[in-house]
Structures are given as C-alpha cells and as structure tokens.
Image (cartoon, grey):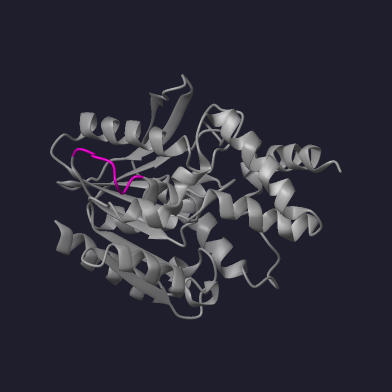
Amino acid sequence: MFEKLKGNIMFTKLLQRPDIDKAYAMVEPTDSWYKTITTVHNSLKEIQKSAHEIIEITSNDNLKLKGVYYPSDKASNVTVICVHGYTSHAEREWAFPGLFYLSLGYNVLIPYQRAHGLSEGKFISLGALEHKDMLNWVKKVNELNPDDSIFIHGLSMGGGIALDLADKEMKNVKGIIADAPSVSIKKMFENIANEVFKKDSEKIASHAIERFEKEFGVDANDFERVDIVSNSKYPILLSAGSKENLEELFTSIKNVNPKDTEIIILPGCDHGNGMYKQTELYQNVITNFVNKVI
C-alpha cells in the first residue's frame, strides 16, 4: 500500500535541485574529513586566482548550463573536462585536481551539471540527460580549442556520466577517467529503497524508476555502465579507494574492455578522497595515463 506514493516521494527527494553550498561545508577539526575539506577550501581560493571565465551552452531541452573555464598560461594542447558528482559544488570538488591539471599546462573546464549551482534545471537525472549535456560541452571545447586533445574526468555520479560517454563518437576526445563511478541508475534506486524502506522496497524502487523514465523520456536499462563500456571507443582509467570495495565491479568493466581499461585502487581511501590522501600516487597514475594516450 502506498508504494507508488513512496516511489514518487523518493524520486523527488533524490533528484530535486540541491543546495550545493552544503557540499564540502567546513567541518570541525575533530572530524575525519577536516584535513580534506580544508584542502578543498584552500584550493578553491588558490585556483580562483588564475585567469578564468564563465562560459555557457544550451542543453538539448533548452536549459542554460554554465561552467568555469581556466585556460592554461602555458602553450597547452590538452583540455580536461571535469564532471562533478551528485549534489556537489562543482568548483569546490574540482579545485584541487584542477590546480594539478593547470600545473601540467592543461586547460580546465568545470561545468555545473543541470540542476546544480550556476546551471538551470529542476531535476538531476543521474546521467540520463547529463551525458547529452557533456556532448555539448565537448563541442564547446572544440570551438575554443580545436586542436586540443580532450580528456573527460568524472567523480562519483560524474564518473558514471563519463562512462555513459564511452561508446559515443566525440571529436578530439582521447580518454576517460572515472573515479568511484556509479555504474547503474536502476541499482542506485533499488539500493536506496532497500536502505530507507526495507518493506516493499522492490515495488517502491520500481515506481521511482517508472517516474524517472517518464520524467526524462529514457529507459533506465540503457544506463548499465558495464554494458556501455563493452563498446568503448576510448581508453579508460578507473580509480577508487580501497575502502569502497569496487575491485570486483572494476574487474567486470575490464573484462568487457580488456585492452583499454586501467585500474588503480588507492590504499586506505574512502569515496572521493583518494586525490587528497594518496596525492602523489594518484597524480602519477593520471599523468602516465594521459601521456600514454596522447
């Protein structure tokens, strides 16, 4: 009883536009994330000292989407598009890795996904529409830097969006980096329904997925990232913290794309903090991946 109502409530609560100022909000010094969050805030202040501008695209469904573009002050021939995660503050999430990419002489683009921050939109679609937005950001980069090699680097939901692009033809895109990617929209609904509702969770998830498919005009089955990667047109680097237990999943992805998939598991790291806790290892792996690809 009431499963459909609960499914609709679940959809709305999960996917409505978030207050991104809560993302990476400062924590107390006793918090285990204090050092990481401090680095996030310091990095944002530092990267904003570099030359940058707000650029804009229009989505296929006529939303104004904005991103922050940091051109390299060196003679660059690489642009990295940084794809942020669920309910995240794009610039805070990507300031620290953005500084790293700028240090290599790469251009950096940090888009705000639909329904986040500077960009329009009522609902997050977990990649169902965002991956189409990213295709338009790729076109924008090709307008700005027509001779650049492009890399797409996503974290969490952004990592899933990056994997959604693996089978798409994209001019000048050379590789994809996916940190702790979400790999199934359906599985996400099912897992959350089970955690929140326990009883009748399968029916509730089914109704939430039905609303999702109707709202966005998609089939959730089309966003099983292992299936998408089986037809990948690009080398892929997969990264996660050892505490996330994603090794089995990453092995499944590598099995369907054995030639062009690399995996790095960052010791002692949780979801999304590997770039802070294992910085040298993480940056060396990325540098080697990019250099090998181009």
Residue 152, position in %: x, y? 32, 49
Residue 202, position in %: x, y? 71, 53
In which quadrant of the rendered view does residue 209 lie?
top right
Going 41% across and 39% down the picture, which residue do you hit? 131
- Residue 237 higher or lower than 165, as above or below: below
Total number of numbered labels? 0
Residue 188, position in %: x, y? 60, 54
Going 34% across and 71% down the picture, which residue do you hit? 263
288 horizontally vs 225: left or right: left
- Residue 34 higher or lower than 46, as above or below: below
- Position of the N terminus by quadrant: top right
Span of residues in magenta: 165-171
Observer-nearest residue: 87 or 70? 87
Whether residue 17 is visible here, answered yes or no, is no
200 horizontally vs 66: left or right: right
* Magenta part, dominant SS: loop
Whether residue 115 is visible here, answered yes or no, is yes
Going 18% across and 42% down the picture, which residue do you hit? 172
- Position of the C terminus by quadrant: bottom left
Observer-nearest residue: 70 or 46? 70
